[in-house]
């Protein structure tokens, strides 16, 4: 890749976790050469969503050339308690809560609000079934996207571990209203999706690319995902970024250091019924490329942060990186 993309960081990943001191966090982001910062919630800007505080933070970010975004939390019609900030802001109504938070976000100059849907174990439930969850949560995502659009907010739905790339894409297209997809290919390994193939599937709706890395290892029950420093795992980032049109197109790139450890129990007889999206060619390629586990410990977040910033600064996806 001939030009490095601008990149963003996530507040929780910054060394020292400068929560409660956003001025220091913004200065740190500038120091790392990033141009964007994603916050865990709108209340990180102001616990009471005070207009004056929101404007001050927005102005501080703008003065440093930093674009802010924020997470809304899980949009799940079956388990609204998983998003307590949304539920509280809306008096138990997630759509109303999203409107309140979008209004506050607009005061701070935030135009992108990110969300997920559920948890990996949700796919295996019999009540409600996964199909029922997709339908009802798709309606909720569409309602939220429509409700926050008048405040200048764009909803970005992330490919979380429980969501296949095509399921997320369909939900984004159903929602309309400028909804985008947050593409996190390391999450898709859990569903036996090849990152480059998945990138081609969702390229038309990608708004943000979340970068991290992992090695795919053989395990007694199938495979396991071991998180690695960016550029040292199995993800072909050059292929992924080319598939979504970077450099030269609009998706933003954000370093997103995952924490969760997942085993992929493909030898469980029930696994195929819960992952009907799995493509035999991608499954076979991932299985063939998996290596044996070793005694090397999983890389810790500080090491992965340093490697991630270095890779992004050097131009992630170039032939010299990865």
Image (cartoon, rainbow, N blue to C red):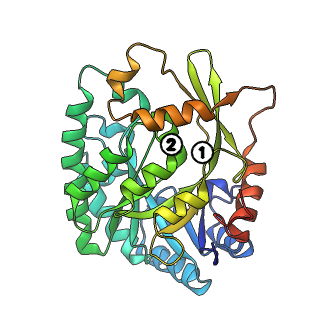
Query: Which residue shows up at 72% across the image and 61% down it?
Result: 321
Q: Is residue 91 left or right of residue 203?
A: left
Query: Which residue shows up at 59% across the image and 31% down it?
Result: 288
Image position, residue 15 (x, y; %): 74, 57
Q: Secondary structure at mark 2?
A: helix
Camera-side residue of 288 and 260: 288
Labelled pair 2, 1 in contact (Cβ < 8 Å): yes
Q: Which residue is mark 2?
A: 187
Image position, residue 322 (x, y; %): 71, 56
Image position, residue 252 (x, y; %): 50, 69
Quarter that holds the N terminus? bottom right
Camera-side residue of 251 and 71: 251
Q: Is residue 118 left or right of residue 33?
A: left
Q: Secondary structure at mark 1?
A: loop
Query: Which residue shows up at 51% across the image and 55% down it?
Result: 40
- Mark 1, residues whose alpha carbon is within 10 Å: few (<14), some, or many (≥20)? some
Q: Which residue is mark 1?
A: 258
């Amino acid at each position: 890749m001939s030009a490095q993309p601008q990149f963003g960081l996530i507040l929780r990943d910054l060394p020292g976790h400068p929560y409660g001191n956003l001025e220091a966090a913004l200065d740190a982001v500038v120091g790392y050469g990033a141009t964007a910062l994603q916050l865990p919630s709108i209340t990180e800007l102001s616990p009471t969503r005070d207009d004056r505080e929101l404007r001050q933070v927005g102005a501080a970010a703008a003065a440093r050339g930093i674009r802010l975004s924020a997470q809304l939390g899980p949009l799940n019609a079956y388990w609204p308690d998983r998003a307590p900030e949304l539920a509280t802001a809306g008096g138990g109504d997630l759509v109303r809560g999203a409107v309140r938070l979008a209004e506050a976000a607009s005061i701070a100059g935030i135009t992108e609000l990110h969300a997920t849907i559920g948890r990996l174990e949700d796919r295996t439930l019999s009540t409600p079934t996964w199909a029922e969850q997709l339908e009802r949560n798709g309606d909720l995502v569409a309602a939220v996207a429509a409700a926050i659009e008048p405040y200048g907010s764009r909803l970005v739905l992330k490919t979380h571990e429980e969501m296949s790339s095509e399921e997320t894409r369909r939900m984004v297209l159903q929602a309309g209203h400028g909804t985008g997809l947050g593409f996190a290919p390391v999450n898709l390994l859990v569903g036996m999706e090849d990152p480059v193939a998945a990138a081609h599937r969702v390229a038309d709706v990608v708004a943000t690319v979340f970068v991290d890395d992992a090695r795919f290892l053989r395990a007694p029950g199938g495979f396991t995902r071991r998180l690695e420093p960016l550029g040292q795992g199995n993800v072909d980032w050059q292929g992924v970024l080319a598939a979504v049109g970077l450099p030269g197109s609009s998706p933003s790139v954000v370093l997103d250091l995952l924490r969760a450890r997942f085993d992929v129990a493909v030898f469980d007889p029930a696994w195929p019924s819960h992952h009907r999206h799995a493509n035999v060619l991608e499954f076979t390629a991932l299985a063939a490329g998996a290596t044996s586990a070793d005694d090397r410990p999983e890389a810790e977040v500080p090491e992965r942060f340093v490697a991630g910033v270095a890779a992004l600064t050097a131009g992630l996806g170039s032939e010299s990186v990865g």
